[in-house]
Amino acid sequence: MLVRVNSATWISLRAATIHQITSFPPGTFSDEKNVLEYRSGYSVQCDTGAGMVLFSRTAAEIIMDLYSNPSSLQMTTHSWRKFYADLFGLDLRTFSPFWAYPPDRAVPCTLDWGYTPSLYLNGYASLGTIPSYATDLEFDVETFFHTRYVTAEKNNSGVAYPRLHPVAHALACGGSSLQGPNPAG
């Protein structure tokens, strides 16, 4: 399905999610959770999640095929951050859902953390609207989940996480290689 984002941009929609929220660990106020980049009328997401997601048939088939070998969806906090460092050159060491985990330990994630990386590897993206049109009917998201919905003020504000420099890239990925994405984009 084609979705009109603004007067000049149309996107072929393959998946939709209500995970278009921002997040902050207790005691801080960071609005950089699921959004990698704020563009004009939409955001590029890093986490689709399994809670409330609608896939096109093609995207659903990709994810369902991966369940035949569940280890293909398995990620750890380290491999997940490394995926986005390698693909987009972004430093997700401050990714707020991982705030409670020891930074030196690769903590296993649930299989749905592999959905969005798997879609990116197959030429799809996970996108959200700006502003978010989602509303949680059960909980006040700011109080209960320490999150906020993406607001119109974020429209076209750019990359939400710092770009990696070659030395930082090696540290963020747990390796010694200085090769990686061009920090200039």
Image: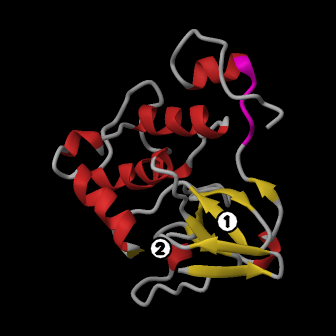
Instruction: Indicate the secondary structure of the residue bearing disc 1.
Output: strand
The colour mode here is: secondary structure
In the image, residue 71 sits, relative to residue 175, either above or below, namely below
Identity, as a three-letter code, of the amino acid under mark 1:
Ser
Residue 32: tell me if it is visible.
yes
- In this orientation, which residue lies closer to the viewer: 58 or 49? 58
Which is more toward the observer, 28 or 124? 124
Residue 63 spot, x, y in % from top left: 31, 57
Q: Residue at x 82, y 74 (%)?
A: 153
Whether 148 is drawn above or below 166: the answer is: below
Residue tagged by mark 1?
A: 43
Q: Judge from the rendering whether residue 159 lies leftward or rightward of residue 28; answer left or right.
A: right
Mark carried by residue 17 = 2
In the picture, measured across the screen, residue 8 lies left or right of residue 30, that is right
Q: Is residue 164 magenta?
A: yes
The residue at 78%/30% (across/down) is: 183
Magenta region: which residues? 162-166
